[in-house]
Amino acid sequence: MKNKPVVIGVAGGSGSGKTSVTRSICKRFSDKTILVIEQDYYYKDQSHLPLEERLNTNYDHPLAFDNDLLIEHLHTLMDHQSIEKPVYDYKIHTRSDETVLVEPKEVIILEGILILEDPRLVDLMDIKVFVDTDADLRIIRRLLRDLKERGRTLDSVIDQYLSNVRPSHLQFIEPTKRYADIIIPEGGQNHVAIDIMATKIETILSKNRNK
């Protein structure tokens, strides 16, 4: 009987460095060992709404996510079965018709701003991480990302930050820090924390393989 995959949650505000932490951990292991699931892929389908309404979506609010589907997919992967992961198209503000075939692996890293907000997700995690980065760095990183990767204008990014991102961070994301087992300041630049995480994962994998 196969061992249950190790599930690691990597949370933190938008632009905190969650992805760099995840990448730094992944570099310590082979591609056959670690699978990354991004909560961003699980924004709710909005194809039934006109584009004007989709533009008003608060992507930093818990209700923006289809956690039911995410939890279903995590259970499927933990049962050593593949899934068809959804793809979200930020240009049309809804889920794409495309999906990505994802195979189960020994370690699942679930990354996202609000993964520690839903108790059902928290219950699935063996290790819970919160990446804690100052607000000024987070807004600069988000600004650069949205301008380069998502075709946004400077004014729209700033308006979204002030109206949705900052209030949602303070109300929903920051409070979830208390559920974390490990808090990592400054994201992927914190090499000591990355080393500790990698060692912990290796220890769990070693125990599982020796059972």
Image: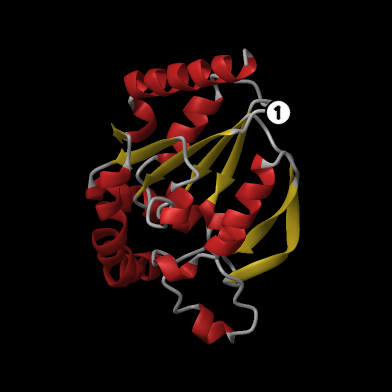
Q: Is residue 159 above or below residue 120?
A: below
> Residue at the spot x=39%, y=50% of the render?
116
Q: Is residue 162 above or below residue 115?
A: below
Q: In which quarter of the image is residue 21?
A: top left
| Drawn side of residue 155 relative to residue 98, left or right | left
* Quadrant location of the C terminus in the rendered image: top right
> Residue at the spot x=40%, y=52% of the render?
113
Q: In this view, does 3 lie above or below 196?
A: below
Amino acid at dot 1:
Lys
Residue 205 vs residue 13, the one in the foreground = 205
Q: What element carries label 1?
A: loop
Where in the figure is residue 62, as x and y percent of width and height?
41, 65
| Drawn side of residue 196 relative to residue 74, left or right | left
Residue 16 vs residue 67, the one in the foreground = 67
Q: Name the residue under label 1.
A: 2
| Drawn side of residue 210 relative to residue 139, left or right | right
* Quadrant location of the N terminus in the rendered image: top right
> Residue at the spot x=73%, y=50% of the render?
83
Q: In which quarter of the image is residue 44?
A: bottom right
